[in-house]
Image (cartoon, rainbow, N blue to C red):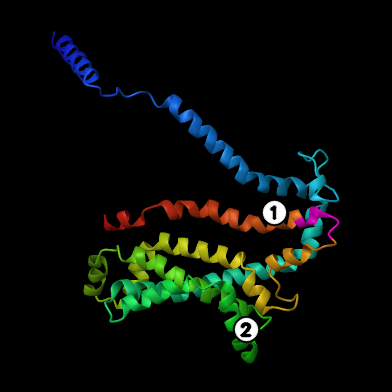
């Protein structure tokens, strides 16, 4: 009996609402189809250059424009040529990128913690300067460093490129990690200090593990920035000894290119480290370590 009364009440309420001009909610299934199709179209447009790069890398053609839509007779000749001719450039890029990550985190992590933990005069001005540095083009920084590095003998060296790339990446890493470290409850650090730990020990044992997600995110962006750097490497290097892969691809492509297979193969190989890092770093970026630490 009570169920029937409830059903009648709901039916009467819907009728009154409809008469007043209110719209009855409609299922969203059909309305979502056009948006899904539109999303697939945009995704296909963005992914097509990547597909064409991979497709051309497996074809023994004379030009990218003459490649077929599918590699009907796939070959690894382009990849063999790429490894033979660009292998040293891959090693140089890896050394520069990893060195930049280590130096950037070594400088930015304690700096971010200091700006988040301690209240000092001029902090806002310093943060404003960091923001302003993000607006300076990389070529301006490279030109400014050229004279300095030339005087101290750091041109055409791994150390010079690592220092230059770190100078570009440190401000962003500080801003990124500071925003996370500000959300860490002070009670966690204060508890460690009460137990006799120093500020440095509390930073290493408490702040760094909790900030793992922010540190991994900063390391990822730093690696991608150093791996894809072109202007700084072009300005500070003039020999092939420390040439990164970006310059290798640039010099690979010229007016007399007759075989695009190795060029595309080199591009594919240069994209693999970034793709692998993005796949493995997703869980660290999306995870919430702070909530578990507070509990």
Q: Is residue 62 left or right of residue 98?
A: right
Is 187 part of what is drawn in magenta?
A: no
Q: Quadrant of residue 233?
A: bottom right
Residue 146's label in the rendered image is 2
Secondary structure state at the residue bearing disc 1: helix
Q: Quadrant of residue 10?
A: top left
- Classed neighbour count for the residue bearing mark 1: other residues with Cα under 10 Å, few (<14), some (14–19), many (≥20): some
Residue at horizontal 58%, vertical 37%? 41
Q: Is residue 54 left or right of residue 68?
A: left
- Which residue does the numbered mark 1 point to in the structure image? 268
Q: Which residues are magenta?
A: 257-263
Up-down relation of residue 212 to residue 153 (above or below): above
Q: Earlier in the sequence, mark 1 or mark 2?
A: 2
Image spot of residue 51 (x, y percent): 68, 45
Residue toward you, 27 or 195? 27
Per the model, the C-alpha gap separating discs 1 and 2 is: 31 Å
**Can you say which quadrant of the picture contains the C terminus?**
bottom left
Q: Is residue 49 left or right of residue 113?
A: right
Image spot of residue 23 (x, y percent): 29, 24
- Classed neighbour count for the residue bearing mark 2: other residues with Cα under 10 Å, few (<14), some (14–19), many (≥20): some
């Amino acid at each position: 009996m009570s169920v029937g009364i409830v059903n009648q009440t709901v039916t009467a309420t819907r009728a009154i609402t409809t008469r007043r001009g209110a719209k009855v909610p409609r299922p969203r299934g059909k309305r979502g189809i056009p948006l899904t199709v539109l999303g697939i179209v945009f995704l296909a447009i963005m992914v097509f250059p990547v597909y064409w790069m991979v497709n051309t890398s497996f074809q023994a053609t004379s030009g990218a424009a003459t490649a077929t839509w599918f590699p009907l007779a796939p070959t690894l000749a382009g990849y063999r040529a790429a490894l033979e001719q660009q292998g040293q450039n891959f090693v140089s890029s890896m050394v520069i990128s990893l060195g930049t990550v280590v130096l950037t985190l070594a400088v930015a992590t304690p700096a971010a913690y200091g700006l988040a933990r301690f209240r000092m005069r001029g902090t806002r001005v310093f943060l404003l300067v960091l923001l302003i540095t993000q607006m300076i083009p990389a070529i301006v920084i490279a030109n400014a460093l050229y004279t300095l590095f030339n005087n101290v003998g750091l041109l055409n060296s791994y150390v010079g490129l690592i220092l230059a790339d770190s100078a570009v990446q440190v401000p962003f890493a500080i801003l990124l990690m500071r925003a996370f470290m500000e959300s860490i409850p002070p009670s966690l650090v204060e508890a460690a200090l009460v137990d006799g730990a120093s500020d440095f020990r509390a930073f290493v044992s408490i702040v760094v593990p909790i900030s793992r997600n922010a540190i991994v995110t900063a390391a990822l962006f730093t690696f991608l920035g150093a791996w894809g750097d072109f202007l700084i490497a072009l300005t500070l290097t003039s020999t092939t000894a420390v040439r990164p892969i970006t310059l290798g691809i640039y010099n690979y492509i010229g007016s007399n290119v007759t075989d695009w297979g190795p060029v595309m193969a080199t591009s594919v190989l240069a994209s693999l480290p970034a793709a692998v890092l993005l796949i493995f770093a997703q869980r660290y970026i999306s995870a919430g370590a702070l909530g578990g630490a507070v509990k």
